Amino acid sequence: MSALRPLLKSICLAFPLCFGMLPFSAFADRLNVQEMDKADADAAKPGFRENYTKYEYRIPMRDGVKLFTVVYVPKDASKSYPFLMNRTPYSAGVHDQGELHYGVDFYPTSLGPSKDFETSGYIFVNQDVRGRYMSEGKWQEMTPHQKAVRLAGEGVESQDMHDTVEWLLKNIPGNNGKVGIWGISYPGFYTSASVIDSHPAIKAASPQAPVTDLFMGDDSYHGGAFMLAANFGFYASFTNEQNPTNLPKRWEQFEYGTENGYDYFLSHLTLKNITSQLSDKQRELLMPTILHTTYDDFWKPLNIAPHLKNIHAAILTVGGWYDAEDPQGPLTTYRSIKKNNKDIFNGIVMGPWAHGGWGRADGKSLGNVNFDVKTGDYYRKNIVFPFFEQHLKGVSGKAIPEAQVFETGTNVWRSYTSWPPQQAQARTLYLGANGRLSWTQPKVDGGDIASQFDEYVSDPKKPVPFVGYTTIGVPQEYPVADQRFASTRPDVLVYKTEPLEEDVTVLGEISPRLFVSTSGTDADWVVKLIDVYPNEYPSAAAPRNRANDVPPPSVTMAGYQQLVRGEPMRGKFRQSFEKPVPFVPGQVESLNYTMPDINHTFRRGHRIMLQIQSSWFPLVDLNPQKFMEIPEAKPEDFQKATQRVYHAPGQFSGIAVQVLPGTK
């Protein structure tokens, strides 16, 4: 789902021209139209219109389809400039007074990854991709790079990019013959897809939060579980239109009739009832993603990763540790390019950001979690700008490390020659009786059956919420949200270490290795890795003022349970995402899966915690806990189940991690 890209959110805000207006109603973290307009006004600085001339073109592709392309050329013609291009399904138009406009008289407030690019001088190019807005042709979700039969008007992104580059080089004067491309979220996908078999003039590309494989950890599914709240809101606004068109002028928000998403989705319960709230037009793109519940031939062609070959440009992939939409995409993209391409620079940057949070925000905090330094400012000034300057203008500078990653907890930037660093060592944290979590397998009394597992009752009609407050969408801060609300629920298992005597740095993939059973025939298993702050911790609470009314309670960071990484696993996919199998009630099964990478230091005095539960609502759709096609479930199919997690001889459950030497 392109939906994913939705997260464009703050980005959209930062780059209104590049992405167009998104359906923010689906996500609490997305900004509404008025907020975007205000942010644009606040960001506006004189100089862009004065320094650049805008042109609009319809560039012909090899099949005759014409793509609408906007070009901003520096008025200073005393030197030549490289092209810096953004290809988007969200409109290359400009938002003014809350509405989308095309025309050479409408200018954006800014272009490029930062203001430094405008000052330095680039020929900025924005293009409506095939089948969207003012471009001709037929749009395809996550354009398949290979397809047995293409319908009239369908294309291949790498070919469209090649033809566009050829035209630009021949028809735009004052260019230096070099092209860069970048984009965030869905435009990140188009960046990746555009450099396959790359045109020799493309010298640098930066796919940022790139949607890569919708079913495997990006917007649509995580662990085989459907990401409900985000995709419902996105597709309610992201619809097919008859193109070329400059419509919609503004994206309409879905009217939930409440600010409580938990109650809204639970009141409808089934996917059939939930999706019936949408119009046929809104369901057109959403329903195939819901109905194709396995990794089948609908999903496989949409995975761009296997096709990232014959790339000749330098690549800088960018992502956020706390990206609610595409946490896996950047990592998969980086690894696929590294595997399939030799003799090119292939770098990765991961920071403590929400989806696109590196675009304009200072990146000093996320929700209640503080990172001490302005990570967004640092990235824009010291990473992305030098990358393009070196490869598109030949500006000399320091060698760019392959991996530049922000280490949360200690809150410092780290550089490595690869990711994850080779010195990382495999360790396992084991679950034990009485909620213990340790680096050694627990000692178990073989005769004490009750001490060999923990159990809880999961009721899909009373699911565990994913945040401890009321929200209608998916707040950007949820990946670091306080989990104290969940740790007190009887349907959540909690395991934690003793206070750490030394720092422990965990990085790379983390992999739950569980032994479980259920009284049903299917079950979800949500594992959350959590950093528990000490009971004595600095507070940012405001000083008490007796003259004022009683203020609302503030969040105390003492004892804060910060989510570091959480992921669901739909149990029927424990053997294969293509061929699900039911559980035998009461039978112990192994459940192994992998979560997206982290780079987090659990500080001395903190504790490491794991929480295990069987719902995460409405972030993830409800599992009826009955082996079946969930989109076909009726209300009576949703049933309680008793879930067990084992820590017995031969069945020691735990979580496999990688730890830097000397930190444990």
Image: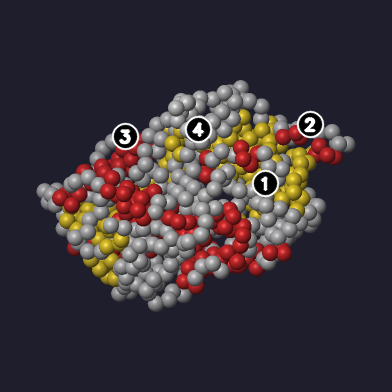
Check disc 1 and report the residue beneath it: 613
Check disc 3 and report the residue beneath it: 398
Q: Marks 4 and 3: which is nearer the front? A: 4
How packed is label 3: few (under 14 Cα within 10 Å), some, or many (20 or more)? few
User: Does label 2 or label 4 sit earlier along the sequence?
Assistant: 2
Q: CA distance from mark 4 to mark 3?
A: 54 Å
Q: Is residue 126 above or below residue 320?
A: below
Q: Is the Cβ of the residue at disc 2 closer than 8 Å to that at disc 1?
A: no
Name the kind of residue labelled 1 in the image.
Answer: Gln
Q: Is the Cβ of the residue at disc 4 closer than 8 Å to that at disc 3?
A: no
Q: Is residue 645 left or right of residue 226?
A: right
Q: What's the residue at 67%, 46% (across, down)?
A: 613
Q: CA distance from mark 2 to mark 4?
A: 51 Å
Relative depth, front residue between 62 and 537: 537
Q: Marks 2 and 3: which is nearer the front? A: 2
Q: What's the residue at 46%, 75% (across, down)?
A: 149
The C terminus appears in which quarter of the rendering? top right
In the rendered structure, find residue 300 and report the number of the disc placed on it.
none
Q: What's the residue at 43%, 51% (across, down)?
A: 30
Check disc 4 and report the residue beneath it: 550
Question: Does the rendering let one see residue 81?
Answer: yes
Q: Give percent across and percent down for residue 543.
A: 46, 25
Q: Is the Cβ of the residue at disc 1 closer than 8 Å to that at disc 3?
A: no
Q: CA distance from mark 2 to mark 1?
A: 24 Å
